[in-house]
Amino acid sequence: MSQLFHLGEGCQDTRTQDANGSILSVEGLVVEFHTSRGVVRAVDGVSWSVRAGETLALVGESGCGKSVSALAVMRLLAKPAGRIAAGRIMFQGQDLLTLSEAEMRERRGRDIAMIFQEPMTSLNPVLTIGMQLAEPLKIHMGMNNDEVRVRSIELLSLVGIADAEHRLAQYPHHFSGGMRQRVMIAIGLACNPRLIIADEPTTALDVTIQAQILELMKDLSRRLGITLVLITHNLGIVARYADRVAVMYAGRIAEEGPAARVFGEPRHPYTVGLLRSVPRLDRPRGGTLETIEGAPPNMLKPPSGCRFAPRCRWRQDICATDPALRQVGPDQSSACHFAENMPPAAQPLSDYALVPPNAGGTLVEVNGLTKHFPMRLGGFFGGFTTVRAAQDVSFRIARGETLGLVGESGCGKTTVGRVVLQLEKATGGQILFDGEDLATVSSQRMKALRTRIQVIFQDPYSSLNPRMTVGGTITEPLRKRLGFTAPAAQIRVDELLDQVGLLREMGERYPHQLSGGQRQRVGIARALAMEPDFIVCDEPVSALDVSIQGQIVNLLAELQGRLGIAYLFIAHDLAVVRHLSHRIVVMYLGRVMEAADRDALYADPLHPYTQALLDAAPIPDPEVELRRTPRALTGELPSPLSPPQGCVFHTRCPLADAQCRSIIPPLREIRPGHMAACLKI
Amino acid sequence: MSIATASNTADPRRPVAIIAFCRAQPLGAAGLIVILAMGLAAIFAEAIAPYEPEVINFGAMLMAPSLEHPFGTDAFGRDILTRIIYGARTALTIGFLSSFIGCTLGGLLGIASAYFGGRADLVIQRFVDVMLSFPIIILALVVVAVLGKTELLGIDLNLVLAIAIPIIPRSSRVVRSAALSVRAMPYIDAARAGGYSAWHIITRHMAPNVLAPYLILLTAYIAQAILLEASLSFLGLGVSEPKPAWGLMLAGDSSNFYQEAPWMILFPGLAISLSVFAFNLFGDSLRDWLDPKFRL
């Protein structure tokens, strides 16, 4: 097994590095896509390099060209549309673009491995894990079956999969998302690659699993001397794991440098804007978020001059000329005419604060809400089992107040939202809306109440009817439910479009003609049209880019302040929830773990699960991250089909003992207004 | 508050849909031309046809195709070309009406089945299963036999119904599967949260989003319906003499005379085949064209 791991070899082997010590350097890369509407330059003259053993993060919003430039390195661009028009990709002193397809195949998987975003679909469902691990070993390393077996077991143990020997014979559907991503990493590691390119490796995963996977990758790259290129939009991840950062915008590099400097002293307004537009857990809560106005440019017709200029708040006349990427500090470069005069990344605290909840009394009260789904077991006569999606959930929302509902996927937060909306019938419990129990009111009464309870969905792409214009979508509630005449409705639609920050002429557009952020605004306008007292927001910003997220968060806060609407804000991003909520409920596996006022919960989380969630959420500041010792929660979310006995969290809880395995802890008031369901506090 | 910038995606030079279709699907365009020709023949039958369709002329019985009678004459001396032109009228009216009624009712049933789900879906789909277990022609035969004839504006409504009924379960199955995926979309949940009636959600939110499979079914079943009408007429249960209908022209006397006068069955048979072929070609191309999965 001498060939298995050459520890640190990547750092010492100078033969394979060029003069400045980089293992991979992309120089002047131009990638074009030929579409029916014309040629799109997705990557336009981009250069970046990564030194051996280093972790480089490519950061940017969707469509900025970060994934495309990585795919170009692997020469895996979609053919025939995608084409590398210019540039060089130097890997270990050799231009990958001059290699033949056969020579390139030799490199892929052996020297350079790639890990994709979607662990659910990047493994072949009909082959066992063992067969998929064996593939690169047989093809690239020429191992025989016995060697393959030994090496596969070693690889699985390396990525933290217990009982590797038995798991080799299992299929991908036996593994959870996080486990599958571990398998993908194991496959990537199979041939001792020099370089791993990870394209959003944890975006599809929950925050506690994300922390596990990233810790694993960082640890492996240190131990095995593997160079890592991490593509992500999450600034927190960059701060915690990257040595160097390249910020991309509209197909170009905006800024590049060591992570500490880019975060500490950003030299490009786009970087400053990105850093300011995410709410941060380590800072006192500000009022409005500072946002980057507008949306990224259409790459079919990119603006001339500085591409960020149309959205830049410090724009001046000179910005009509193209700024070159130039050295602006030790090892740091920026493509801005005013790189030396950048304001600090720290967001000035605005004096405007969220309107305090008015003491209008309780609007929504949920008592002991329980929802079970029957699920058919395998086979025709398999019978049914129940999925306990929500168990004994209780909370209260006052008028004009926001309740944040937080938890990882599968914790039942969306189910609670759907039951409150009466899109699903509750199995048990009460949902009092303004004193009326929604679970038992007549359907006539429910229909009347529906104008007062509205919803905003996560996915702005599927939450609008593609066959209806924006105007039609907003008019419908006015005409059908509120009895507006056509001319009156038209006036109101214009008002609503103004209110959510859309142009009036957008009323005639169809959803596919709008960007994601604009569609989400239409979804908000549709909900507002009913003049509701209460809106269930189901992950309203999690499908949006960082700079757009801030805009929508501000809009929701502003609307609440002006119209006094109460929100049930369902999300997994703890920082966003803190920014918007007055009170917060943390759920795990269908049960409430902790409920408290916002400041109490974030300042002093009581439940070990809440603590773990806060620990796992990375903070976009390398200095803060250096001081924190990441305590990744171990283990996986248990299946909701067979939740653990006793406390549902005991399988992953650092405090758990025998008592926790048998007694279901009640939610009790530990401090005034601060409830937690744990026996150990 | 920000005014989100407009992303202008409208293309002013986008060709009209029908031209784009003809370019992308030449076979479908050929089908469309045949269908349009049939349609024109049906509408302007009086102007085009050289003779009267129902006037018997024993002086010109069983004449072979000639310049005077390009497709020959039948046992009653009626011009076959004329009767084929008038027959297009019968075929298209009955074909289109019955396919439209069958696909629309079936489509609504399918969407309702998908929308309500659960027990309603179970009941509707088991009923559909039962309907599907009868061969299409048998079901039509039974309906015609039970209902008899009800003429309105020269169209036998019961014949239309007899052809439409077997189409209902078939189209409802296809539309239901498309509607199931629409049902899972958040905009349907948003509409439910808006408190709209089931009828409103089905017609305004679900139906427009299953339009593509519906249109494909509609054209495909026009072909089926024309064939079915011809079969029923051939069996003497559809259109009755002396009305001109293609299936009817193949039946009756032509079976006694086809050896001496093969043109009596040749030309109506060709008309049936050609029209069915044209509708099928058009329907297939329409499916390819509307389904983005088939687009490269």
Image (cartoon, coloured by chain):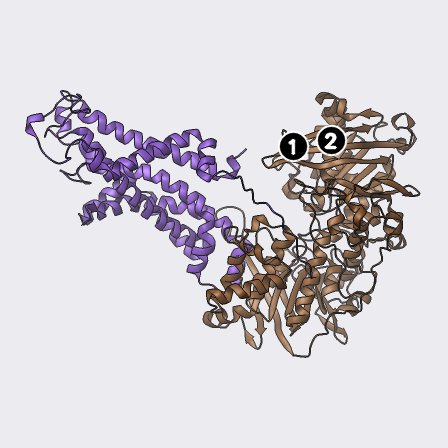
Chain colours: A brown, B purple
Can residue A427 be seen in this snapshot?
A: no
Work out whether B148 lies above or below A281.
above
Chain on which label 1 sits: A
Tag 2 subunit? A
Same chain check for tags 1 and 2: yes
Q: Quadrant of the N terminus of chain B?
A: bottom right
Q: Quadrant of the C terminus of chain B?
A: top right
Q: Amino acid at mark 1?
A: Ala
Does residue A489 appear to the left or right of B72 in the view shown? right
x, y (%) of residue A413?
Answer: 64, 60
Residue A44, by quadrant, is top right
Percent across and percent down for residue B161 are: 26, 47
Q: Residue at x 44, y 60 (%)?
A: B200
Instruction: Farthest residue to the front: give it.
Output: A317
Q: Residues within 10 Å of mark 1 (few under 14, many from 20)?
A: few
* Dot label at residue A78: 1
Q: CA distance from mark 1 to mark 2?
A: 11 Å
Q: Is residue B74 above or below residue B173?
A: above
**Front residue of this view, candidates A227 and A607:** A227
Give above or below for B64 relative to B118: above
User: Percent position (x, y) of residue A6?
Assistant: 87, 31
Q: Which residue is mark 2?
A: A74
What amino acid type should be assigned to the residue bearing mark 2? Met
